[in-house]
Image: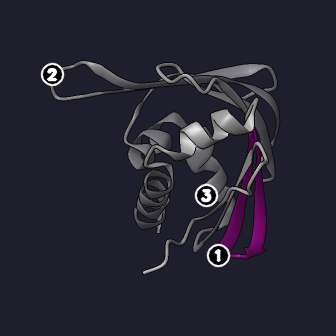
């Protein structure tokens, strides 16, 4: 089965484009990306801090069964328009590929469907390619599938 979340990484470009259509109202998808209790459900990670306002911030953390932190990410929210757009930075703290600039666009298709488009920009093509060596595509598809299932 083809993944529902499409990830495009063009050769020699430092961007990743992510697109997914959801059988959800756009308002619900936007909440799933901005409300800590919802983020924790579909991402499977703990929200340590979150302020979804311009110049706000967020911090996520995932621990294994022994309590050791295995994933930690943070960022700054630069611009946010409810149900339409988020511009933010994203940094996985334990990885070497640095900070990305992300543009998330939420598009209403009908009362019960919407599209999410994400453009992630890396400092270099090499850093972007380093991220793609991880199970990035599988991970985003798993998370988006879980989001669709939980909120449907």
Task: Tell me where residue 142 appears, x and y as whole percent.
Answer: 41, 58
Please identify the quarter of the rendering in which residue 120 is found. top right
What secondary structure is marked by label 1? loop
What number is the disc on residue 112?
1
> Which residue shows up at 72% across the image and 21% down it?
56
What secondary structure is marked by label 2? loop
Q: CA distance from mark 2 to mark 1?
A: 41 Å
Task: Tell me where residue 126 appears, x and y as whole percent.
Answer: 67, 35
Q: CA distance from mark 3 to mark 2?
A: 33 Å
The answer to whether 22 appears left or right of 105 in the picture is left
> Which residue shows up at 52% across the image and 19% down it?
93
Check if mark 3's residue and mark 2's residue have beta carbons within 8 Å.
no
> Which residue shows up at 47% across the image and 69% down it?
152
Task: Tell me where residue 19 appears, x and y as whole percent.
Answer: 68, 63
Question: Which residue position holds label 3?
Answer: 28
Question: Which residue position holds label 2?
Answer: 66
Q: Is residue 88 above or below residue 75?
A: below
User: Which badge, 3 or 2, is on the more N-terminal residue?
Assistant: 3
Task: For label 3, count other residues whose C-alpha is less than 10 Å away and answer few (under 14), some (14-19) or many (20+).
Answer: some
Task: For label 2, count other residues whose C-alpha is less than 10 Å away and answer few (under 14), some (14-19) or many (20+).
Answer: few
Task: Tell me where residue 71 appears, x and y as whole percent.
Answer: 40, 27
Task: For label 1, count other residues whose C-alpha is less than 10 Å away and answer few (under 14), some (14-19) or many (20+).
Answer: some
Q: Which residues are magenta?
A: 102-121
Please identify the quarter of the rendering in which residue 27 is found. bottom right
Depth order, front residue of 56/71: 71
Q: Is residue 143 above or below residue 60?
A: below
Q: CA distance from mark 3 to mark 1?
A: 10 Å
Predominant SS along the magenta part: strand
């Amino acid at each position: 089965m083809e993944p529902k979340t499409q990830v495009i990484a063009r050769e020699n470009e430092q961007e990743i484009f992510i697109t997914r259509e959801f059988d959800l109202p756009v308002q619900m998808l936007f909440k799933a990306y901005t409300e800590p209790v919802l983020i924790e459900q579909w991402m499977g990670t703990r929200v340590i801090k979150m302020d979804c306002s311009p110049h706000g911030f967020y911090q996520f953390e995932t621990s294994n069964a022994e309590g050791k932190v295995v994933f930690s990410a943070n960022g700054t929210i630069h611009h946010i328009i409810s149900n339409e757009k988020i511009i933010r930075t994203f940094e996985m703290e334990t990885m070497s590929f640095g900070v990305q600039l992300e543009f998330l666009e939420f598009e209403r298709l009908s009362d019960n469907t919407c599209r999410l488009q994400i453009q992630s920009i890396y400092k270099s093509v090499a850093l972007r390619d380093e991220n793609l060596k991880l199970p990035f595509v599988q991970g985003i598809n798993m998370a988006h599938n879980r989001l669709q299932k939980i909120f449907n």
